Amino acid sequence: MPAVELLNISKSYGTTPAVRDISLAVEAGELFGLIGPDGAGKTTLFRILTTLLLADAGTATVAGHDVVRDFRAIRNVVGYMPGKFSLYPDLTVQENLEFFAAVFRTTVAENYELVKDIYEQLAPFKNRRSGALSGGMKQKLALCCALIHKPQVLLLDEPTTGVDAVSRQEFWHMLGTLKARGITIVVSTPYMDEAALCERVALLQEGQVLRIDTPAALRAAYPWPLYAVRAARMHPLLQDLRAYPAAHSCYAFGEAAHLSLRQPAPDAAARLTAYLTGHGHTGVVVEPVEATIEDTFMDLLAQRQPSPNSAHDQPAQ
């Protein structure tokens, strides 16, 4: 039996659909990612799974419990970390942890082994009010409070948004440690680089699932020859690449542009360099690259919304 299962879940706010006919299953002990931009429906799914919101259609279970019939049971087996910091800012680190332990009728001492590695990083600040903590420390405290009752399933809604790169890396290391303890983890993120750290991911856009697969399979599914292109001026570069006769799609990717071609060609890089040089570009560098999950995501979007120029300028995250 899956640890988390959604079957044909739909939810609208008034006339605006938030999620549409979503079905997916997360296996016990799996680290599963919900990947998509703001508005993709990630938070709505978490609220349904945590019994905070009723779906308009479909069914969902967590640890074998139905989210409607068994809502009390679910609240005892789920640890939930919402996207916004939701602990009590006027309580200290220690007081917040003790409070949440009491809510679940346990004690910090009883399950301390589960949070020990995380809480030891907070211990020097245990008497500090949580509202005065840094973003990374707030994140660690929220995770401790979500774990203090030893849940079977951990649901994390964009836990690394707004924290520094080092804290993001530390957080994902902590998730790996928790997964090794057998906890099922479902985490959402808008960051495509974090998708590669999951065992499987669901790519979401506008409340619908584009594809569910492993990160490696998603990268391998990209069907087009792909090049990273750099030049001195990015905006004119993007315009000229999109006008290139052999171009399939083009969008900004960090400091480069990612250009896919309709057909492979052994001299594609040389032809492209000559084309750009002929259009007045300097410092041109053209390199073949392996597709990332973001490249696959953008290609799936283009398939859903075909247009004469299939990709738009979307900055990489």
Image: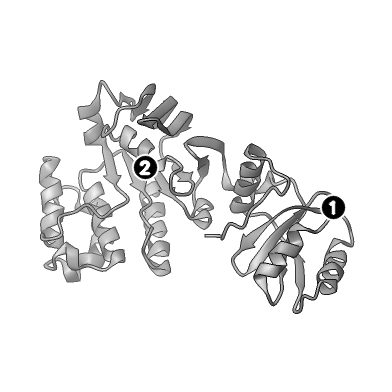
The one of 242 and 162 positioned closer to us in this rendering? 242
Name the residue at 43% across, 32% down.
Answer: 17
- Which SS class for mark 2? helix
**Residue 51 in the image: x percent, y percent?**
27, 32
The one of 148 and 58 positioned closer to us in this rendering? 58
**Residue 93 in the image: x percent, y percent?**
16, 61
**Residue 198 in the image: x percent, y percent?**
49, 48
Q: Is residue 107 visible?
A: no
Q: Place residue 258 in its image quadrant.
A: bottom right
Look at label 2 and name its amino acid.
Answer: Thr
As drawn, the label of residue 229 is none
- Which SS class for mark 1? loop
In what quadrant of the picture does the N terminus appear? top left
Look at label 1 and name its amino acid.
Answer: Pro
Using the image, determine if residue 129 lies above or below residue 303. Answer: below
Reading the image, the residue beneath label 2 is 43
**What is the CA distance from the residue labelled 2 to the residue labelled 1?**
40 Å
Mark before the other along the chain sequence, 2 or 1:
2
Name the residue at 31% across, 38% down.
Answer: 152
Name the residue at 53% across, 57% down.
Answer: 193
The one of 145 and 112 positioned closer to us in this rendering? 145
Specify whether 160 is left or right of 250: left
* Other-residue count near label 2 (Cα within 10 Å), few / some / many at <14 / 14–19 / ≥20: many
Reading the image, the residue beneath label 1 is 264
Proximity of marks 2 and 1: CB atoms separated by less than 8 Å: no
Using the image, determine if residue 281 lies above or below residue 146. Answer: below
Q: Place residue 268 in its image quadrant.
A: bottom right
Name the residue at 63% across, 40% down.
Answer: 305
Using the image, determine if residue 87 lies above or below residue 283. Answer: above
Specify whether 69 is left or right of 258: left
